[in-house]
Image (spheres, helix red, strand yellow):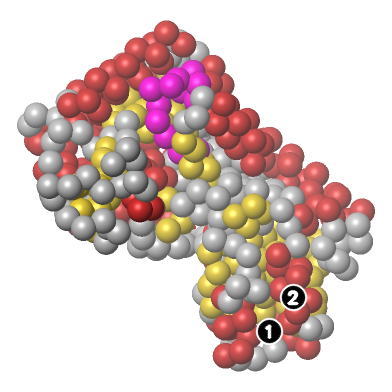
Amino acid sequence: MDITELFKELGLDSSALSSGTLQVRSPVDGASIAVLSEHTRNETIQIIGQAHEAFLAWRRVPAPRRGELVRLLGEELRTHKQALGRLVSIEAGKITAEGEGEVQEMIDICDFAVGLSRQLYGLTIASERPGHRMMETWHPLGVVGVISAFNFPVAVWSWNTALALVCGDAVVWKPSEKTPLTALACQALLRRAMERFGDAPQGLLGVLIGGREVGEALVDDARVALVSATGSTRMGREVGPRVAQRFGRCLLELGGNNAIIVTPSADLDMAARGILFGAVGTAGQRCTSTRRLIVHHSVADRLVEKLKKAYASARVGSPLEAGTLVGPLIDRAAFEAMQLALEQARAHGGAVFGGERQLQDAYPDAFYVSPALVEMPEQTEVVCQETFAPILYVMRYESFDDALTMQNGVPQGLSSAVFTTDLREAERFTSPEGSDCGIANVNIGTSGAEIGGAFGGEKETGGGRESGSDAWKAYMRRATNTINYSRELPLAQGIKFGD
Ligand code: UN1
């Protein structure tokens, strides 16, 4: 499908994509695919104002009816799954299966949120006073500001938006400057759902096109009750305190430095497959990508050999071509960061396999690399950093205790996994003294989580939880109600006051 047709199917007006100052380039070949005009600070403030107006109306709509809008959004996504998946591939460089997989993740969260729209339950609590009842009520929160990254340009928005909409909130979204087109396509799809829905308030979703200035206006606006931000730890360090300064709420989903432990009893073929998808998939540009392999010395040689074979045969190429497993890095800066990390690893005694630039002749303005496997003598400084590229550091261990210490010995705490068939090791890994991450898996890799669970992590990952389970509670405010249906006015704690 040619790009003009793709834009048309996704409701993007081609003429609006060729004016302005924001260059949008495809990482597939580095070519410009659009030039967008950026919002000013004033426009941003206006868009937040419209979202706030929309919130005031939307909060009065019954939650199951709000769920109907999300159901319709899910229908639009089903209809346009291929087209939106392809735009994700063009704009973010994901292979076709992963681009479409990302849209499937959106459909899944819509289904989840529709069910949730009838299950925003509060508790009933026993009162200590006779003739009294206590309960909890969950109310819509306000405008939710969503800041998202290039690597999951649409799914992370949908986790936030599907929940926010059923919770009665409006959304203002600042997508990455690297992937604004997929954001505009999502906005157009939601608009279509809103037209079919009938009476949804217009400002329910604002999309901000621009860089730091619009992001700052969103973060600092007191009408934005919750800022849900996905990206680097550096970004989170700025956003968190600014939102806290005005007593707003933050949901942070920041860097990961995810490890897989492989123990002597592991099924090595299965482990190798899990590691390959985790470390090489999405060209190592997921926050859940596997970045460290902690392997028992008795199986290390065998596993590394298997991995080297798999690495050598993983096809690097255009994500739009069938058979490609590894697409491009997002841009030159990502390539340079990767090379710098590899140099540092070498300086710390690392033996690097792979990592070279590929396809430079065919795509001089794009950045393809062979994935790198780096055997490290120990977990040095560079291993403790998140480098957003396909680098897998391999370290060996002697005792399971050491493996756990190494797994937890980095500043980030998003995802983790153990491959073992030893019940004791599996249980210890998921126990309180095991992995310190928000996600701890057994016999599956670190990436590719389902939407049904809460997603997020500890330490420098920021502590936020999005997506499934009871993550919806972050998008609502809780009121505790005590209702007296007696003719007396007893005070709590047995206090007698003036009688
Ligand atoms: C991200 O990289 O920001 O678990 C999100 C996964 C996906 C989501 C990743 N479901 O890899």
Closest to the camera, between mark 1 and mark 2, is: 2
Q: Is residue 397 left or right of residue 288?
A: right
| Residues at marks 1 and 2, CA–CA distance in whole angstroms | 9 Å
Within the magenta stretch, is there residue 289?
Answer: no
Residue in the image at 74% along x and 75% along y: 403
Would you say the residues marked 1 and 2 are in contact, meaning their CB atoms lie under 8 Å apart? yes
Within the magenta stretch, is there residue 223?
Answer: yes
Q: Can residue 430 be seen in this view?
A: yes
Q: Position of residue 444 (x, y in %)?
A: 52, 74
Residue 153 marker: none
Q: Is residue 339 left or right of residue 323?
A: right
Residue in the image at 82% along x and 63% along y: 379
Element type where label 1 sits in the image: loop
Q: Can residue 287 be seen in this view?
A: no
Among numbered discs 1 and 2, the one appearing first in the sequence: 1
Number of numbered discs overlaid on the protein picture: 2
Q: Position of residue 172 (x, y in %)?
A: 36, 28
Q: Looking at this view, is 238 or 213 the one in front?
A: 238
The amino acid type found where label 1 is placed reads Thr
Q: Name the residue under label 1.
A: 263
The amino acid type found where label 2 is placed reads Ala
Element type where label 2 sits in the image: helix
Q: Is residue 79 left or right of residue 372?
A: left
Q: Name the residue under label 2.
A: 403
Q: Position of residue 100 (x, y in %)?
A: 36, 53
